[in-house]
Image: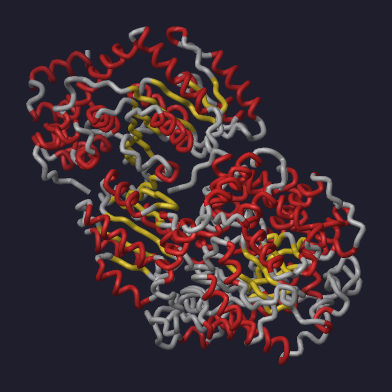
Amino acid sequence: MQFNGKKLILGKLGLDAHDNGLRIVAKWLVGAGYEVIYSGLYNNPQRMVQMAMEEDVDAIGLSFLGCEHLYYANKLMAELGKRELGHLKIIMGGVIPPDDVATLKALGVGLVFTPGTPKDQILSSIKELLG
Amino acid sequence: MAKELKRSVEDMVAGVKQGRKRYAAELMSVIETDGRKAEKYLSQFTTPLKKAHIIGVTGWPGVGKSSLVYRMARSLLAKDKQVGIIAIDPSSPFSGGSLLGDRERMKGIDGDERLFIRSVATRGHVGGIAGSSRDFIRVMEAMGKEIVILETVGVGQDQVAVTQLVDTIILVLIPGMGDYLQSLKAGVLEIGDIFAVNKSDRMGVNQAVADLKNMVGLSQHQNEWIPPIVKTIAINGNGTKELMGHIDRHRQHLKKHGLIISKMRSAAKAEIIEVIMSRCIDYVAKAIELNGTLDKYARQILEGSSNPYRAADEILMNCGFIEPKQSLSRRRKVDE
Amino acid sequence: MNKNTDINVSYLDGEKVPHFKSLSDIEYERIYSGSDGSGELPDAGQYPFTRGIHQDMYRRRLWTRRQQSGFGSPEESNERIKYLLKVGQTGVNMDTDVGTKLGLDPDYPLAQGDVGLQGTSICTYEDMKALFKDIPLDEVSSTLIVQPPYSAVIMAQYLLLAKERGIPWENLIGTIMNCSLTQLVGPTFQSNTAFFPIDLTIKIGLDVMEYLIPRAPRWNIVNINAYNIRETGVNAVQEAAFSMAMAADYIKGLMKRGLDVDSFARRIAFFSAAQLDLFEEVAKLRGMRRIWARMLKETFGAKNEQSMWFRTAIQTAALPLTAQEPLNNIVRAAIQTLAAVLSGTQSIHTTGYDEAYSLPTEESHKLSIRTQQIIAYETKVVNSVDPLGGSYLIESLTDQIEEQTWEMMKVIADKGGFIQCFKDGWVEEQINEARYKMAEAIESGQHPIVGVNTFREQEEVAKINIFKHAEDMQAKRIEYAMAFKKNRPQEPVKQALEKICHLTNGSTNLFEPIMHAVEANATLQEICDALRKSADFTIPA
């Protein structure tokens, strides 16, 4: 198989260190032919956007397990707008209550995965989003 | 990812020369995906030459290369240097994807204006480096980077390719690799200009240093450079100062013996050959339907009615590269 | 995997579970008989305490119902503590938020998004006062979930509070978790060392213990965090071995400071997990009691029997709880609670059914307490001590787990002890291997989870009440922290912090200087930053 032409950067914003889900998704994406830049923990929104720009990725993938998703979604979208990087797709996953999914999408988040979404669904949704 | 560049050549070149990361990032993507298209930008950067000090950091997975590169970059930034990091990770031979994890170790410096980090996958290129590595270095030099650190996937014999690209090679090892060192063939350790024994707070560090000293002593070295061995603990920075000192010394050594210029000359020649070969293949592929033709010849070879040399000659003949008469007479000579 | 709701005829045929291994890969026999097991057992309350550390166990006194709580501001958390005590909780258990756990004030930029979400945000002495308002510190025992070096600040705040209320420290009952290697989520090594240098963390943890031992004799100086270890996905044997080895390191650390083992060992307790393999969990705790007793007596030469008592607080493991069909978690937690009771634990936190979504609502918190009360009062399992003791299966499993645990403890000891193994990356390797195995087992269905990879229905949205934080909670906390730092006399703070800086790199016990800084109104982060500065340590921005 060959590199499928799409790059993503995966990471976590803020202090939460639960990265198990993120690592697993990273592995799945690599197995599906993506190039995944893994930036790990303790990122802030400005830095995340900066890295996305330097690596010229197609999408940013974030995971939230502590209810901080709305706070960071707002900050991230603002930063992307400021840097004129609105074309980047945003993917979020983790412990996100179903009520908040609509709010996130309205902010501009492209995909939201709630806990237990099977691997196949995650991969096919991302494939559809990135084209 | 930018595959189509909306910027004009002038804009792009100017932006990169100003050190603007966004422009450089986009250009690098084009280099990776469409080398031919990238040429028209890259040709603007080859002259006048702005040479940076290129440092290669290589070693077995898990020895702490990224953490060491972090320490090196941090030390350089503290001296207000312009730094570039190209972090190379392997592409999976099965899926084609790649996990590029070096950014994880760069926290604390990765927001710095003076630092540009780019993660690269090998995409099938052999030698532990990526096909685009040389051009990436070129872009970084054009940006004004004074030092470019190339962190490569280092496992043994295929590291030799790195030597052509970089000026100083640091080989990173950890204690407990004694058996592995013994099994290495000549030529592998020789490429190290500096050896770093990382995680040196672990058991066996003195043995590791002794083993290295033995092996290094056995190999040939050019121009009397004796590769120093430095103990480091990348996670807390121990040994960084010493390491940076050795890098400086090596750079002086290279300058003193004119080695940088001679290497640049060889590299230029090698690159011309590469471009010629790439052009030739492109030309052939454009002139004939290459895949189908290759299929046809492969079948013939397996049937025993042809051989690879004849196949190549016939293809080149069909493309107009060689005259029919010449190939006939060559064959007659061989038969005699 | 079953993805549709049509009738699956193959089940009418007779379903089977995929295998007969325990959660720790121990093969369960078809049936156990008299030839398994090690024979006669000493009574509960008798060395080596396999059947229990007290002769009468729950007949004399039930385990403590100690639900973790804490969210948002100390004031909000105080309300929830009072509510829980009202519905039948018998001990307080306060959990701090991520920022507090990492020694950051609410106004630190990287911390702002996480303030108060996963626990109480504590920053100042005032906060501690607000958290424990109206709670009688000498009548109800409190567990403070905070680790070194931050535990020094929080403990100092608590001691000052007691002093202010005229309660002698000898009368304080409770625990400070104070376990150095606890941030085991995520990239283990990184998350434990990103915000504070590890050697100083361990040293301050011992400083806290050393300070408390002579002054607060009824206070537990550490809870060895076996729970966090288990939550990473490792098995029961690893949970037991890692935690025992870690305890051994702490004991050695204290003895190196000249302390006699019997002066402190009875104040060491554990914090364990109760997973879903009920028999294995019971066997695990029985095995750990035996191991602890032997280790204290034979390895460390303890003479006092109380030093040999293995005491633990149990939380029912959150790992097996699912986001799908969350009401199923009530059943899971109930069975895990039962396992904890049958194994003879000292206190229990029953994890809420909404664990996968958020912090517990009042409703789910109450249900957790009711679960424990029903088991205590309605099922009769508390009527006899160690009710499963003597079962061929339980005795055999106890022996097996004990043996495997000793073996692993030896491996760790040979590698230089748990702390060394941690620094060398060995622990992280074990954890990553376990995580990977678990993920594979879930994907393949070898590890069945009802409603997730087995008996899963089409996409349904969970319909439960999910806890919501107050909208302005974070903004208010951030404002409070900034105002507090602005509106106090700055000189005493400066002096106290300077003193800490000077003493950091020596061998002086840092607890008192830290307590003086708290008294001078320094905040948690200010104190930690002083320590970080002396250790030349930078934290992520």
Is the residue C43 above or below the residue C303 in the image?
below
Residue drawn at x 11%, y 45% as measured from the top left: B6
Q: Nearer the viewer, residue C141 or C130?
A: C130
Residue C287 visible, this angle: no
State the count of labels: 0
Residue C123: give x, y in percent of width and height.
54, 61
Task: Classify B46 as above or below B154.
Answer: above
* Residue occupying image coordinates x 77% and y 75%: C344
Residue B188 horizontal/vertical position (percent): 47, 23
Which quadrant does the C terminus of chain B fall into? top left
In depth, the one of C79 and B2 nearer the eye is: C79
Front residue of A51/C255: it is C255
The answer to whether one can see residue A97 in this image is: yes
Residue C418 coordinates in the image, percent (x, y): 69, 49
Residue found 72% across the figure and 46% down from its top: C509
Q: In this picture, is C344 found above or below A126?
A: below
Q: Residue at x 17, y 27 (%)?
A: B45
